[in-house]
Image: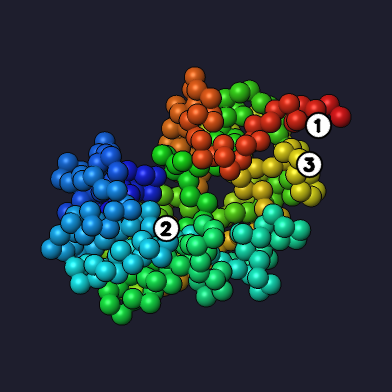
Amino acid sequence: MVIGAAGQIGRPVVDALARDGWAVTAASRGGVRDADWDEGVRTARLDRADGDALAALVGDGCELLVDVVAYDAGHARQLTSLADRIGSAVVISSVAVYEDGSGRGFDTQDEPDGFPAYPVPVPETQPTVAPGEATYSTRKAALEAELLAAGDTFPVTVLRPGAVHGPYSPLPRELYFVKRNLDGRGRRVLAYRGESRFHPSSTRTIAELVRLAAARPGTRVLNACDDEAPTVAEIGAAVDAVMGAETRTVCLDGPPEGSVGSTPWSVPRPVVCDMSAARRELGYRPVVSYADSLPRTVEWLAGMVRGRDWREAFPLLAQAYPDLFDYAAEDAWWAA
């Protein structure tokens, strides 16, 4: 059973498991069926917040439960309450749980010198923020703590993706470059010399890790990132290549100047995760490069914003990055 099957991560996860021979029930709020899925995939409607509905759907049991939308300790307890009916589980968390040696994490990034200084690369043994209910990071940490505490009851693999990318994303960072090309913006400004690295995670990479963990049940925590961690300048160049665009790029030595130079990847220190544990424990090997994953994403993004306000198409992205396309500020910067 895959919970959250209609979302960005859930769709390729269902596809990967079905292709690997699993009889899959794809559960989502709308009971959506993806055109790429095998016809044998069963769909079901499920409100993730409804524990009774989840228990009823699990019924007498399932060999594998994959939860791509679990968010906090309450969701974890829903799963552990069904431990006697679940063979093993794979649950999606986030690299946002990591904390550096000075107590800095994603929750402190807007404070003066608050962005974390992680080791490069970040291993799964890196300390995490304290579990709690206050933020996305603390709630994901609480999710992990509850699940891992029950690890002797049923095997659970926790996966920590980075900057997730692929079609059907509610927060598609690649739109930053795609929309600029569609709008004929032939120049751009990147902060931090264009060298920012925020480790991307293809949905196909995550799906492959789920597939491998399903075949090797165990209690573990693994990073779930791509084999490559390109810089923001390299990401822009890769999008340009897909779209056949030529763009002049100018880099700021330091942070953005207001909205100018700011992108969804613009971080002052690298966030690069170690994938050696996944290779060692699951036999993981990369299934797609960042550049090779882009054409489908770019095509989907272009279709989503064609004839529409980008904020209408992606309200979550607009909430997180309201000044993502502040062309007036950019033009004023170029003119200064």
Q: Mark 1 points at which residue?
A: 333
Residue at the farthest bottom position = 152
Q: In this view, does 19 lie above or below 179?
A: below
Residue mark closest to the camera, 2 vs 1: 2
Mark yes or no: residue 106 visible. Answer: yes
Q: Earlier in the sequence, mark 2 or mark 1?
A: 2
Mark yes or no: residue 225 visible. Answer: no
Q: Earlier in the sequence, mark 2 or mark 3?
A: 2
Q: In which quarter of the image is the C terminus?
A: top right
Q: Mark 2 points at which residue?
A: 71
Residue mark closest to the camera, 2 vs 3: 2
Q: In this view, does 70 lie above or below 131?
A: above
> What label does residue 256 carry, if any?
none
Q: Residue at x 30, y 65 (%)?
A: 79
Distance of mark 2 from mark 3, alpha carbons? Answer: 34 Å
Q: Name the residue under label 3.
A: 257
Q: What residue type is labelled 1?
A: Trp
